[in-house]
Image (cartoon, coloured by chain):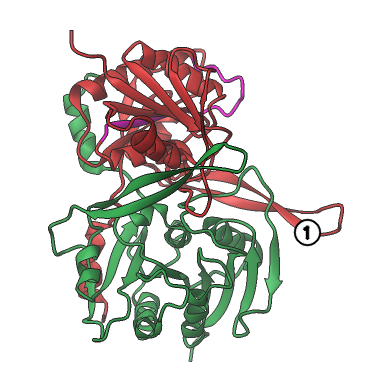
Chain colours: A red, B green
Amino acid sequence: MGKKPLILVSNDDGIAAAGIRHLVEVMTKIGDVVVVAPDGPQSGMGHAITIGNTLRLQEVDILPQADAYECSGTPADCVKIAKHFVLKDRRPDLVVSGINHGSNTSISVLYSGTMSAALEASLEGMPAIGFSLCDYAADADFSHTLDYVENIARQALAKGMPKGVALNVNFPPRQNEPLKGIKVCRQANAKWQEEFDVRYDPHGRRYFWMAGNFVNFDKGEDNDEWAIANNFVSIVPVKYDLTAHHAIMTINEDWDL
Amino acid sequence: MGKKPLILVSNDDGIAAAGIRHLVEVMTKIGDVVVVAPDGPQSGMGHAITIGNTLRLQEVDILPQADAYECSGTPADCVKIAKHFVLKDRRPDLVVSGINHGSNTSISVLYSGTMSAALEASLEGMPAIGFSLCDYAADADFSHTLDYVENIARQALAKGMPKGVALNVNFPPRQNEPLKGIKVCRQANAKWQEEFDVRYDPHGRRYFWMAGNFVNFDKGEDNDEWAIANNFVSIVPVKYDLTAHHAIMTINEDWDL
């Protein structure tokens, strides 16, 4: 028997969220688990990092199966401080993030703290996966996701990850029928259409709540929105190279620069 | 003569930064300018959005050539509130962000608030450009960049932008010799290697400063790091579709899912 793999776990809902407890339980079946996660909710933080402020890091005892640390920073900060301070010379064999309370399909990958932890790990060359359940309820049922989480994580350890790639895995909310399987697919073409709710505080000063409706423009069936709507697990391989390679020639040819 | 184009300006260094004043000055030569920018520094905010807190928005008079608003949110928030509240039915012909005080080349595009404003606009189908000067000094000299900024913005208005694409434009710091021209290129393969400086507060509690060294692994000459190091302007077309399309087949073929 070889050494057990070292698995780093983070999330963006904070170390006390139900989703990360489920993820840690699954990962302890596979390897040695170290958790470095935000000390509070960090949803919607995108790939934010803390550069003008200090960070705190505290060992905590709320996840008894794992060495666990809460950090005052963003999910990307958590991966950085895990790598360079907590783990030092121990290199994780796998980095997993989530299980997020809420969807990170399509354009939400840009805003997602869950996925920023995974992308941060992928740019260090570590196999990395973000898991999200498309159910925002605090008491969401994660039970249908756990076997899939385990299998996908084991596959990543066995097969490795294509260079520069991380996985964005989303699960439909629990239905009456079992999940239909997995679709490896592309990010759907969809967006949030914001609305701003204007209110006035007790001092008469205006403020806003941002809210939004999700709008799906995508008519294809090879994307994550279709998969989730049809009770499949979606896996979108994503990369941190944002270059629109096809546009380089267009701009070189058509623009007078 | 047609109507003047409507240009929305934002940034991540805050509305009082020197870089946005330069950008507004250039844009007022081209069109009608509306500014919605953060009320303070938001560097390193990535694509963060404000979902658990309220937003403030205030008209300000510090950029006399333009209608200007400061917002308490992130750069992505600024574009959203500009689109849905400030501009309402007026659709910008161009969205520009910057000029950032500091580089947003290579992997820094992920962490960049400047580029999140541009990406946010691009996913609304608006031509969008983020401009950054690779000089962090508060009194950095922007003078060598301004003609380029104007030309690139005029080209974007004249030629339009490939669908789903925004531009990440970086300028070298001012040298003794003039800029050598423009390279339309890809994002370099480079990263930040963090170090954590451990300190103790007056109460004896540990805290950390995150610092980092930039490490460039890229041996190519077709990337933004090479362009900047050789005194060229770099233009990297970037996209919000993070799908690693080439990896879909690999995972479908090689993994047991």
Q: Which residue bears the numbered disc 1? A: A206
* Near-viewer residue (B211 or B118): B211
Is residue A213 located in the magenta-colored stretch of the structure? Answer: no
Callout 1: 10 Å neighbours few (<14), some, many (20+)?
some
> Of the residues shown, which amino acid type is indicated by label 1?
Arg
Q: Quadrant of the C terminus of chain A?
A: bottom left
Is residue A116 found left or right of A31 in the rendered image? right
Q: Label 1 lies in what chain?
A: A
Instruction: Report the number of discs.
Output: 1
Mark yes or no: residue B1 visible. yes
Mark yes or no: residue A148 visible. no
| Relative vertical location of residue B40 with respect to residue A187 in this rendering, above or below | below
| Image spot of residue B79 (x, y percent) | 55, 61
Q: Quadrant of residue B216?
A: bottom left
Most common SS among magenta residues:
loop
Is residue A45 found left or right of A6 in the rendered image? right
Q: Quadrant of the N terminus of chain A?
A: top left
Region rendered in magenta: A126-142
| Relative vertical location of residue A7 with respect to residue B11 in this rendering, above or below | above
Is residue B14 found left or right of A121 in the rendered image? right
| Image spot of residue A214 (x, y percent) | 54, 43
Q: Residue furthest top?
A: A1
Secondary element at image label 1: strand
Q: Quadrant of residue B188?
A: bottom left
Residue at point 82%, 53% (across, down): A201
| Image spot of residue B19 (x, y percent) | 48, 75
| Image spot of residue A62 (x, y percent) | 54, 18
